[in-house]
Amino acid sequence: MTTAIRPYQAVFRARFNLLLQYRAAALAGFGTQCWWGAIKIMVLAAFFRGAGSTPMTLKQAIDYIWLAQALLTLLPWSVDPDVARMVRSGDVGYDRLRPLDTYGFWYARAVARRTATPLLRAIPMVLTAGVVLPVLGASDWALSPPAGWNAALLFTVSLVLVVALAAAVATLMEIITVAALSERGVNMIMGGVIIVFSGNLVPLPLLPDWLQPFLQLQPLAGLLDTPLRIYSAHLVGAAAVTALVRQVLWVLVLVGIGRVAMARVMARLQAQGG
Amino acid sequence: MNALRLYGRYVAVSWRAQMQYPGAFIATSIGAFGATVVDFIAIWALFARFRQIEGWRFHEIALFYGVVSVAFAVADALTRGFDIFGPQFVKTGDFDRLLVRPRSTVLQLMGYELRATRIGRLAQGMIAWGVGMHFSGIDWTWNAWATLLFAVAGGAALFCGILVLQATLAFWTVESLEIANTLTYGGVEAAQYPLDVYARWFRNFLIFVVPLGCVTYFPVAAALGRADRTGLPEWLLPLTPVFGFLFLAVALRVWRFGVRRYTSTGS
Amino acid sequence: MTASDIVVDSLTKSFHISERRAGALGAAVGLFQRRRRTIQALKGISFRLADGELLGLIGPNGAGKSTTIKILCGILEPTAGHCQVGGLVPWRERIRHVARIGAVFGQRTQLWWDLPVIESFELLRDIYRVPPDRYRTTIGALIAMLDIERLLDTPVRQLSLGQRMRCEIAAALLHEPRVLFLDEPTIGLDAVAKLAVRDFVKTLNRERGVTVILTTHDMHDVEALAERVIVIGNGSILADGSLSALRRGALAERRLLVHFAHDVERTEIPGATIRRWEGKGEGEGRSAELSFDPRVTSAHGLIAYITSKFDVEDVHLDEPPIEEVIARFYALHAIDG
């Protein structure tokens, strides 16, 4: 068993190390993220001031927004530039030369990409929002700790599922890129779709009521909305577990679709000469 | 040939170069539209639920949003030369080529490319602007139009100033810092809403340090007949975009200082 | 002072380099404290160039050639010293000065990559504010002289290096500058292209009176073009004069190449040093290369001696390659200076 997963582990580790080197880039975006979070919160606070009943409290919304910023880099915003380059140069066929299951290989790579950088980005964000702000006397705007041990536990589980789900989405995007021979279309569409339907743009519960049933069922809710709502106890008990199950189901579905699509695309590539 | 006509030539050249790949141009423009219209969707969605923010209504926010979007789209289209200044000109030493020509470096950098794909953001900004004006029920006089157009001009000048300052940094550090992105994209984000929804210190920052408020909040509030919200006398408000131009003037001064440093240290 | 007299007086230029420290700890420290090193690129050089002269500026890499050119172009300010081109101080009146000079940088192009050549020319015409009728005359002459008529509609990126260089030169001259700076103009060109460029520059200088300053590593460029040569080494001028004077000063040496009719044994030749001796072999194989000091040994005498001693098929008298002369020159000055 260990020998079987070793190549995937190696891929994982190599990717992890490479991404740890992008520290500078990570640091540069931090200021922007703080700004973004601050603006969104101030705007929401102003909206809430004049409102009657709301689907979530302001405190929950604030936690949601800060965590959404912290976890930003987990999301599959765009196609992995290395893959895009490989597709454009025609080197994709080389992956078939390796004695690995191609989908598994790509999936491991996508998972690795979502473990190193996000960790580095999340920590300063969480520290600033959770610790620095209260110290500065702005506890009202700060990130609160999880709403209890249950919430914390389920949140952690949900986060792991986020990585699995995001990797599945990312791999699917890469496969589409190979099929389309270019990453441009995918990049154009996915950025906007993800920002809306994951809850990054506006916390999902705050979007119109008539959209809620759809929003809760669609796969991208599991990327941000589910863990963030669990965190601040907006989702508790059975509802929380249901949401987790939905995450798992979408992971399985997307991985399944991904495997099938990968096989079809690779077969077609081989037929065309790689 | 004076500077304006030369710039016109640069634009013609740049346009032809981009039109050589019409597919890519259309695709990128549509992508830009999609990426930016998402912000407007957020505003619409929030108003669908909350109806009003601190007494401001949807169409008013739409107008704030439209004005700042258009201003930034214009500035973004003009300043590609400054965007890539560090890696393309300083790092490679290609800036020498510009210095060997008997023209201002600013003119040559602006002439480097006119990013036509920014029409994506421009279009959605104009749509929001239109929506805002249409649903406001206000009788739009020449006066109000003049105020708004002056605001756009001042806003474009302000954003250009920010981008020129970012490019100037390249004279000192080889890596270009992303700080300006916070002020440009972040600025567009912040100016979508009237500044009185923000905390006092933030509002002051956006008026006195980076005069974003002077090119959006004040003039648009005046055009909307909401001068009372700003706490400033009504006659003053349409004139505040001048601070956008002043900001640009300061930025150009700093640029000249940077060029001086480049020629004395030889990078 | 005429429009393009160049006066350089005690030009000095120092650069401050921040040194990077090694290792992660060093990088962290480096954020707070920069170690600075001063490099003296120019140590007070002086020369005068009259209107219409053609100057070859040579020197090893890092000697200060590019720095000098940049200062003369006005894109670099000296630390000390004075310089005027046609009465203007280059870096102080950049725009006025730069309108009167042309520059070709061998490694870099000033043409627009994606545009047809003719459109680059037209854009430059507008940048340099050349009146349309003068432009037509000038560009017509340049196109004819450089033989680039067929290339005008081709995008620059599709040109070969030789073709591109001819277009670069045209571009540098279409505003009729009185001074032309050529920085490594023949680098990477094939033999035919090099000759074309050299011919053109010679004509430009001799017939049109354009002052030319040429920096190059190709000594044959210098030989073909420059009546006057300045050698820069280590930030100072090592020599300023004609190429033959330089040659005499550095390397009083001539070479004799002898081809033998039959196999010969290697023998010492009085008054000459053997550089190479191949006594046996077929055809061209039997040859020897000798060097001698013409001040000590006469060429005539040496040839007479050899033809009397050996069965000689052919002799060839030559000077050492110019590269050797220059290399010798650098070496001499490194030892002395």
Image (spheres, coloured by chain):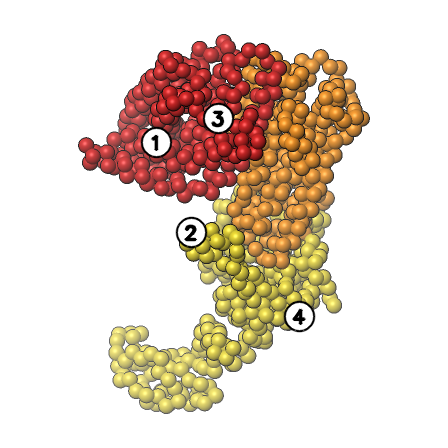
Chain colours: A red, B orange, C yellow
Residue C175 drawn above or below residue A253: below
Rendered-image quadrant of the N terminus of chain A? top left
Mark 1 → mark 2, Cα distance in angstroms: 29 Å
Residues flagged by tags 2 and 4 on a common chain: yes
- Bin the neighbour count of mark 4 within 10 Å (Cα to Cα): few under 14, some 14-19, many 20 and up: some
- Give the amino acid type for the residue marked by disc 3 in the picture: Ser
Mark 1 → mark 4, Cα distance in angstroms: 65 Å
**Which residue appears at 68% of the width and 30% of the height?**
B213
Which-is-in-front pick, marks 3 and 2? Answer: 3
Residues flagged by tags 3 and 1 on a common chain: yes
Residue B85 place in picture, x, y as percent: 57, 45
- The answer for which chain carries disc 1 is A
Residue A108 appears anywhere in the view: yes
**Figure quadrant of residue C228:** bottom right
- Give the amino acid type for the residue marked by disc 2 in the picture: Ala
Callout 1 secondary element: helix
Q: Determine which residue is flagged by label 1.
A: A111
Callout 3 secondary element: loop
Residue C203 drawn above or below residue A54: below
Callout 2 secondary element: helix
Who comes first in sequence, dot 2 or dot 4?
Answer: 4
Rendered-image quadrant of the C terminus of chain A? top left
Residue B74 place in picture, x, y as percent: 64, 32
- The answer for which chain carries disc 4 is C
Q: Determine which residue is flagged by label 4.
A: C9
